[in-house]
Amino acid sequence: MLCSSSEIWHLARAAEHMQATELGGRLAFNQSERDRVTVMFSGEDCVTKKLTAIVVGSLALMAGQPLIIQHWSRAATQVGIPLPSGSFSDTRQASMAVCVDPSTIVPEPCSTSGAAVLADSTLQNGYVTLDSAGNGCAALTEVDSFLPLAPSSSISPSIVAIINKSPLLVETNEHQVFTLVDYDSTSGIGHRSVAVYLGGTCSGASFNSAGATKVNGVTHQFVVSNDGNRIDFLLTSFTNPTRGSFTSSGTELRQGSQNEQ
């Protein structure tokens, strides 16, 4: 049974459509290929030609497999935890030793002979803005409370009494500037250096240092979770010589969803 010219045209288009579809729509026949398919379906047995169209479609499926697998392979190599960016709330807590001159209670390096040690309990909260490179700026309020002191031979009773009765120390104009050191998207773990300032302002992830005084430099190890919406971190070192032993950690939570960034 001969195929009509209309049937031949439809068979050629069907084969073209099947191949293009199976390859994810990424292929299209040019005119010479379309003519070749039309000739292939021209002949005496229309039923055979229709079966051939099915085979051509199946071959298209098989030919498409390596491309599809390759596409999945590329996607697999991109699987990981993206470095977060955007606006985050920032909450922290710390305990640390602060070294002071026992006669004046002025902070001094912990290496100073005869330095007295105060136990400082610290809370902070505020916000941080991170850019796509992992750098950022945080604006924080800090509250410090010195734990009560027992009578000491190095600090006079009158000064001990003042410390034990002192109110909370509140700092409302603290800023921290983050610089990414490294990040592993497989584990979501990274490190960043942090410069601590009193004064200045944040403008998004950038810091305006006008009127600012640098008071410390620290390093964080952080881990990203919850689809990039949460960052937990701990402090691993600092440069201020008036600080002794310490523990410090915090959490940053996205303000809005990842998809809104």
Image (cartoon, rainbow, N blue to C red):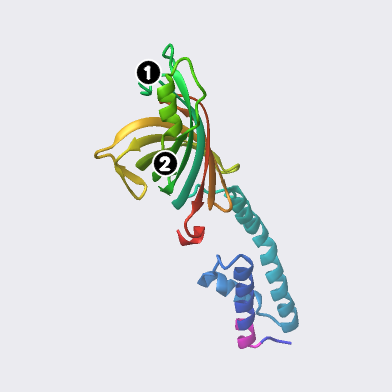
Residue count near mark 1 (Cα–Cα under 10 Å), binned few <14, some 14–19, many ≥20:
few
Q: In the rendered structure, which segment of residues is drawn in magenta? A: 4-9
- For residue 103, the mark is 1
Residue 159 in the image: state x and y as whole percent. 40, 24
Quadrant holding the N terminus? bottom right
Provide the major secondary structure of the magenta segment. Answer: helix
Residue depicted at x 54% and y 69%: 28
Judging depth in this view, the residue of 139 and 109 nearest the camera is 109
Q: Nearest the camera: 14 or 69?
A: 69
Image position, residue 244 (x, y; %): 48, 23
Where residue 153 appears, x then y in whole percent?
A: 47, 15
Amino acid type, mark 2:
Glu
* Element under disc 2: strand
Q: Is residue 253 left or right of residue 216?
A: right
Label number found at residue 142: 2
Q: Nearer the viewer, residue 254 or 169?
A: 169
Q: Is residue 104 left or right of residue 44?
A: left
> Mark 1 belongs to which amino acid?
Ser
Tell us which disc is closer to us: 2 or 1: 1
